[in-house]
Structure formats: structure tokens, C-alpha cells
Amino acid sequence: MKPSLDFVKLVLEKVSFDKNLFVKELKKSIEWLSQQEQSILYRWCLQQFGSKYGSDIQEVFFGGA
């Protein structure tokens, strides 16, 4: 059974104190979620953590150097 979007959000909130954990869990979560859920998660992540991890969020979702 794949985790729900709400569960993914809860996990990300719990690990948001540590950049490496946050990025690791975010990468795992986008593998499990549908395209629509990924889009919702992306917007939510930017709203919740954009000031702290904005460039990391962008990199996880869209790749980059």
C-alpha cells in the first residue's frame, strides 16, 4: 500500500528540522505519488518550506546541477 499525500506531508513536517532527511523523504515521496499528488505536494512544500529549502525542493522536483 502506498502512503497517502497526508501521510507524506506529516513525515516531511516531522523531518523538516534536518535538510538531508527532508530531501531524502521528499525524493522517496515523489516516487510513490501520482502526478496530480506530486503537483499538490510541490505547491505545499514551497508554501511550507520554501524559505528554508526552496532550492532543494526545486532540485528534487525538476533536477538540476
Image: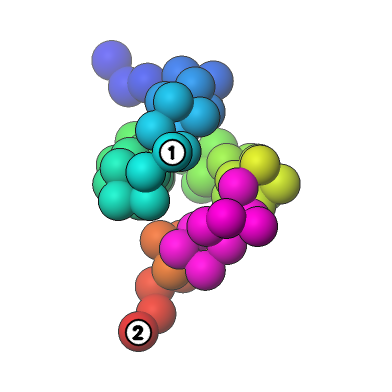
Q: Residue 43: percent from the left, percent from the top? A: 67, 48
Residue 1 in sight in this render: yes
Estimate how packed mark 2 is, as few (under 14), some (14 to 19) or many (20 or more) residues with alpha carbons within 10 Å: few
Mark 1, Cα crowd under 10 Å, few <14 / some 14-19 / many 20+, is few
Q: In the rendering, at what x and y percent does residue 35 appear? A: 51, 46
What is the distance, in whole Å, between disc 2 and disc 1 at their CAs? 24 Å
Helix, strand or loop: magenta stretch? helix
Camera-side residue of 37 and 15: 15
Q: Secondary structure at mark 2?
A: loop
First to last magenta residue range = 49-57
Magenta span contains residue 52:
yes
Amino acid marked by disc 1: Phe
Name the foreground residue: 10 vs 35: 10
Q: Is residue 33 visible?
A: no
Taking the view exactly as shown, the residue that stands out farthest to the front is 17
Residue at 60% from the left image edge and 47% from the top image edge: 49
Instruction: Choose between 48 and 5: the one closer to the eye.
Output: 48
Q: Quadrant of the C terminus?
A: bottom left
Q: Which residue is mark 1?
A: 17
Instruction: Tell me where residue 37 appears, x and y as whole percent.
Output: 55, 37
- For residue 62, side relative to residue 27 (left or right): right
Which residue position is annotated with label 2?
65
User: In the image, what residue type sits under mark 2?
Assistant: Ala
